[in-house]
Amino acid sequence: MTPPDERIFVAFDTETTGLSPREAKVVEIAGVRFTESGDEISRFSTLANPGDPMSPEVVRIHGIRDEMVRRAPAPEEACRQFAGWLHPEDVLIAHNAAFDVAFIATALTRGAHPCPRNRVVDTLQLSRALDLPVPNFRLSSLVEHFALPATGYHRALGDSLHVMALYQRLTEVMAEEDPPRTRQLMEKAQVRSFHEMSKTLNLAPRVAVLPEAIVRGEIVTMRYEPDSGLGPFHRVRPIELCDIGGAEYLRAQCMHDGAVKAFRLDRIIGVEEG
């Protein structure tokens, strides 16, 4: 039995038909619930039928073929089942979490289902914040770096298990830090919940490309109010949309000096790719 004061985590992952949550759909979603001490509690896994044939390029990535999803639920229903499996107190963990959160939030919103408010932690952002000595921060590279068991990549359940093992190892690395530094690292690794992400689906047209840029890690050129004190043009890599003091902000890495800055959404005049 899990001690009542022990935190519960869910490592989760999705496989999709593409990179844009506005155009592509979920074809598989999975999660692994486990305790703070690393004991697995339960699993969730289901395929999803996107309703359209999958491209050969996508099939080469995850190996999920049209005939495998023929009897599977629609993405909206698959994500509803996953959301129903979650407990309100679960802390969710994913690698490049904004990608998975955006796809699930989009499917839930499309199906008129409520979006969970669970806290979400990103092992990609946490690994970057720890400045690990790795050639890149892909999930496979981090699994190899820590010599963790590899069970096959680009399937939702297998990658959920990879994320679970990676998070446990990252917490061991963080245990060597002092408490204030640990809190700072966890703050950097937290991303918007499904509920918060769903609110970005109806952004004003001038900033509507930001959620997708966040998911893809793309650099954009942003036009900002000239009297803001920050200058009219900024090339940035968007990180997240957040609420600061009751106002909506974009947190983004400035390509000029590498610093992470906050920009008020209502002062952004327009956003262009590149």
Image (tube, rainbow, N blue to C red):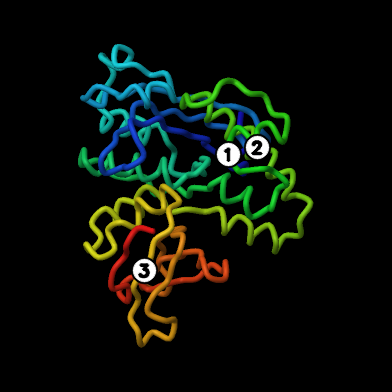
Dot label at residue 222: 3
Image coordinates of residue 76 in percent, x first then y, are 26, 33
Residue holding disc 1: 138
Marks counted in the figure total 3
Give the Cα separation between the discs numbered 1 and 2: 6 Å
Q: Which mark is residue 202?
A: none
| Quarter occupied by residue 83 | top left
Callout 3 environment at 10 Å: few (<14), some (14 to 19), or many (20+)? many
SS state under label 1: loop
Q: Earlier in the sequence, mark 3 or mark 2?
A: 2
**Nearest the eye: 49 or 184:** 49
Does 192 sit left or right of 76 as displayed?
A: right
From the top left corner, tell me how far across and down residue 41 is, in percent: 56, 27
Q: Is residue 103 above or below residue 190?
A: above
**Disc 3 residue type (three-letter):** Met
Question: What secondary structure is found at the residue carrying circle 2?
Answer: helix
Q: Is residue 191 above or below residue 241?
A: above
For disc 2, the marked residue is 142
Q: Residue 112 lies in what quarter of the image? A: top left
Label 1 Cα crowd, 10 Å radius (few <14 / some 14-19 / many 20+): some
Rounded to the nearest angstrom, the CA distance separating label 1 from label 3 is 27 Å
Helix or strand or loop: what does disc 3 sit on? strand
Could you tell me which residue is drawn at 61 percent across and 50 percent down? 126
Gap between marks 3 and 2 measured at Cα: 32 Å
Identify the residue at image location x=40%, y=44%: 101
In the picture as drawn, the residue positioned furthest to the front comes out as: 274
Quadrant location of the N terminus in the rendered image: top right
Near-viewer residue (112 or 225): 225
User: What's the residue type where badge 1 is placed?
Assistant: Arg
Mark 1–mark 2 contact, CB under 8 Å? Answer: yes
